[in-house]
Image (cartoon, rainbow, N blue to C red):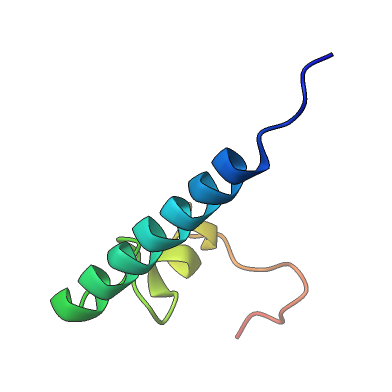
Amino acid sequence: MATPNYSYEKRQRELAKKRKAEEKRQRKLSGKPADESAPDGTEAEADTAPTTGETNPAEPQT
């Protein structure tokens, strides 16, 4: 059985860390969030809102 090459694995981890740090640095410089959704979550709330105009049956109608 072949022995594991720990130095190769370590180098790969180091390269991944460098890559991730560089991407984070670029995001900070651009000043934009990582994803395209709104930072306050308004976009996610809009998806859950009913679109048929029906009211919630638990709420009394006025």
Q: Relative to residue 52, is residue 32 drawn left or right?
A: left
Q: Position of residue 60 (x, y in %)?
A: 71, 82
Q: Relative to residue 29, is residue 61 drawn left or right?
A: right
Q: Which picture quadrant has residue 36?
A: bottom left
Which residue is farthest bottom? 62
Q: Is residue 1 above or below residue 19?
A: above
Q: Position of residue 2 (x, y in %)?
A: 77, 17
Instruction: Classify the position of the C terminus by image quarter.
Output: bottom right
Res 51 seen here: no
Q: Is residue 9 above or below residue 51?
A: above
Res 6 seen here: yes
Q: Position of residue 49 (x, y in %)?
A: 51, 63
Residue name at image x 48 percent, y 57 percent: 14
Q: Nearer the viewer, residue 13 or 54?
A: 13
Residue name at image x 15 percent, y 75 percent: 30
Q: Nearer the viewer, residue 2 or 19?
A: 2
Q: Nearer the viewer, residue 34 or 52?
A: 34
Which residue is farthest left? 30
Q: Position of residue 11 (x, y in %)?
A: 50, 48
Q: Which picture quadrant has residue 23?
A: bottom left
